[in-house]
Amino acid sequence: MRTAIERDGVVRHGLARRLINARALARSIERRSRGEASFDAILSAIRRYPVGREPVDPEGPGRLIRKIRMKNKIVVVIVRDRPRVQPMLARFAGEIHDAEGETFRMVWASETVSVTIDSKNLPRLEALLPRPSIVRRIDDLAELVIDMSPEIESDPGSLSAITTELAMNDVNVVQLATVGPGRIILLVNEPDAPRGYQSLEGMSKAG
C-alpha cells in the first residue's frame, strides 16, 4: 500500500491536502492488489500514512462543486482541418439549437478539428463532410458537466483532485474542457458515467 502511494505524486499531494477520498483510494488499491490485503486494512494504512507538512484544506475541492449534470449519447468526430471543410463546419454549427440543449463544441488543433455533438446529429454531420476528411470517431460517450465556484481558479489541485477521484473509481476521462469561469466538461465512456456522477456527488457532499 505504501508503495502505491509513494510512486504517485498526485496521490501523495492529494492526501497531504485532503483532496482525495481515502475510501475511494482504498477501493482502487484493493482492486489492484488482487486480494493480497483487505479493504479495511488498506483504509487503515492510508489513514496512518505520514502526509508531511503540506498545507491542508480541511474542506477540500468538494466545497467548490455547485452542480453536476450528466448527458448521454455524445460523440466526438475528429476532422482534418482543410479550407474547404471550415465553411461546412460553420454551416453545421448554424443548424445546432443551443436553446434546446443540443451539444456542440469545436476545438482546433494544428491539423485537425475535434467536433463534439449529440449522437442524433451525427448522420447530418457525416452527410455534410467529405468522408476522407473524417479521421476518427469516438462513440458511446457521456458528458459530466461540473459547475464550480470561481474560486477553483485560485485553488491549486482542485482539477487534479476531480480527475483523480474519477480514476480511483475506474472512470476514464476521454476529454476535458473548461468553459468560462468555473465550468468543467468531462467526456467519459457512457457505461462509466453513472459511477463517475456518483463519485463526484459524493465528493461534493464530503466537501
Image: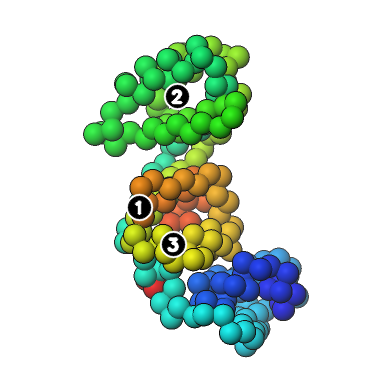
Q: SS for tag 3?
A: helix
Considering only order in the chain, which callout, 3 or 2, is on the residue closer to the N terminus?
Answer: 2
- Asked which quadrant contains residue 95, the reply is top left
What residue is shown with label 2? Answer: 122
Q: Nearer the viewer, mark 1 or mark 3?
A: 1
Q: Position of residue 176 (x, y in %)?
A: 50, 47
> Position of 168 compared to 121: left or right?
right
Q: Is residue 75 visible?
A: no
**How far apart, in angstroms, are the residues tagged by discs 1 and 3?**
19 Å
Q: Is residue 1 left or right of residue 99?
A: right
For residue 161, above or below residue 119: below
In the rendered image, residue 179, in percent from the top left (x then y), is placed at 38, 46
Q: Tell me what residue is drawn at x 37 percent, y 17 percent.
A: 91
Q: Is label 1 in contact with label 2 (beta carbons under 8 Å)?
A: no
Mark nearer the N terminus (1 vs 2): 2
Identity, as a three-letter code, of the amino acid under mark 3: Leu
Residue under pointer 3:
200
Which residue is denoted by mark 1 in the rendering? 181
